[in-house]
Image (cartoon, coloured by chain):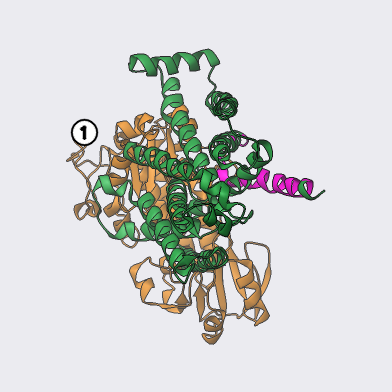
Chain colours: A orange, B green
Amino acid sequence: MRDVTDELGRKIQIPQNIHRVISLAPSVTETLYALGVEDRLVADSDYCDYPPEAKQKQHVGGTISPSIEMIASLHPDVVLVTKGINRLDTVNSLASLGIPSYAMDPHSVAEILTSTQRLADLMGATQVGDTLATKLRQQLAETQKRVAPFPPRRVLYVVWPQPLISIGQDTFMADALRYSGAISIVNEPQSWPQISLEEVARQQPEFLVFSGSHMASAAVNIEALAETPGWRLLNAVRDRRYANTSDAIERTSPRIVSAIADLARQFHPEAFKVETPTETDQGGTRLPAPTENAPPPTELKPKPPSAQLDPLVIAECACAR
Amino acid sequence: MRPLTFTRLVMNCFYLAVVLFVVMVIALKLGAVPVSLYGLAADLLQVLFHRTALSSNYDLIVIDIRLPRILLGIVVGASLSVAGTAFQALLRNPLADPYILGASSGASLGAILTLIVQPYIALPLAISVVFTPVGAFFGAAATIAAVYFLGRREGLLDSNTLLLSGIVSGSFLSAIIMFLISTLAGRGDLHGILFWLMGDLSTTLQPTLRWVLGVGFLIASGVIYSTASDLNLMLNGEKEAMHLGVDVPRVRLVVYIAASILTGLAVSVSGAIGYVGLLVPHVMRIIFGSDHRILIPTSAFGGAIAVVLADTLARTVVAPSELPVGAMTALAGAPLFIYLLRRKFA
């Protein structure tokens, strides 16, 4: 047995070598797959849907109220949870059964990466974790280098349109926007503030940002908003200036790095002009943007994106303008 | 009961209309974007008489965002109060409010179901923008119709049976909602769902819905008003009213349907805004007496004033964030209700 401190500062005792883990959050499941330790993942939650193989794992219920019985019957060495999604009750019930749980709680993009490394440590895959984190940091730096010359876009992240829910300034999503060369016009301390449309009309964001998880398609959505009184006052709606990305932007997993790159391309297409189309573009459904189609091949060849992480994100980007 | 003269009715309504107007002006002026009174008047005159494009974005904010929201608040508040007055008279129970028959739970469930299925079905744009309010309305209508049939005894509506079946249906539907929420908690739809449970006026309505809402309100409250004298007689007992020539079953059915339509309309665009339909009729009864010929119109004004006031607070106290108006009415309504209760029995 060894003592480990999790990201909430709780001391837990876990076996020296971890053979069986259960993940109760989609982001944790994704991270385990990214670290290549998915064979030790014995079960996950109903909402763990990425990568698609995660859906084939045994499920122990939802994130809010998983079945403690089923978790216990699977005899995990440790249960992985996040503070943002899971409940303390679950952790306490597990503790009373003698099942240790390790909590993750990243609040920024940088913390997501260190959090990934710590999880790799826990799983005894320190080397893999370091390599992955280094690669992701390089990708982030690459994106940042490209968008750095341009002034950040002022954007409104739309979590839900009616009533208008956006993201607070302290969320990791607001941080991800900053990495992608944008800044949220919402400056609130709550995580999910309800914002007055009036304030948005006053601020006139340059872009609206939608994530793919619950908007079936942002294209339909923005057409609906353009017809809606109030919303049609926004120049971004009138000119159909919006960015759409996968739900990776809402998850504290390594995949957020590719979501950041995807958003950066949509916010600052000019920053990515001199570039060969990557292999991921071929299967994608990107609309041809007249200003940037068929960029000439140049020497500035980006390293091939991690095959595991990128395709979904790019495929869902249907609206670069 | 003081005899009602036409002058007294008109004067009382006039006073309330003045109060409503002042509240509207305040509501139009306050908000995240500062607007001067003079600019406000200029904008309104321009829109009313010239129909020209407004000069700046600031004017558009007032006309396109604030004014529709205030008008929505007026119709919703008036609908809830008239429906509350009607249900209190119909059920002869001072605790009755528009949601007592389960309308809000039904509407929430209808709305939640549309939110759940929407991503999976491709709807034309024109339908998808009104899908959720329509779903909410049918949810409310179905619930109230079900409660009606559950609440009948030997072919007649029975107040107690109706109340009990309303409460039971409401809690049953709430249980289904809780079930859906806990099974769907990992999905993003939750934000949209919570809105239906809290009550909120920030929805911007499609023009067609605005017409449906306004016309529906006028017709349904007109119908209720036409039964005002009968409701007065029924206050003293239904047998007595029947002896005085009131067709009690018909009045009950008509009021039941009209009040349900009002509730369904209000709840389908704003979720469940608590306390307005319960409290405003009581306050108006204290001020103006329990003659329904005057209580119904004054309640309509009172409800409008209460909701617009509450929504103005909801918009401004934590600006630029917003609170749901339902949280505001509950915060103000609960203590006021207790106060009225204590005063009555003191």
Image quadrant assignment for residue B30: top right
Q: Residue at x 54, y 48 (%)?
A: B231
Q: Residue at x 62, y 62 (%)?
A: A7
Dominant secondary structure of the residues highlighted in magenta in the image: helix
Q: Residue at x 63, y 47 (%)?
A: B330
Amino acid type at image mark 1: Thr
**What is the magenta range?**
B317-343
- Residue at image mark 1: A291
Quick check: can you spot residue A141? yes
**Residue A59 located within the stretch drawn in magenta:** no
Q: Is residue A89 above or below residue A277?
A: below
How dense is the environment of label 1, judged by Cα within 10 Å: few (below 14), some, or many (20 and up)? few
Label 1: which secondary element: loop
Q: Position of residue B53 (x, y in %)?
A: 33, 18
Q: Is residue B75 above or below residue A104?
A: above
Q: Residue at x 49, y 31 (%)?
A: A199
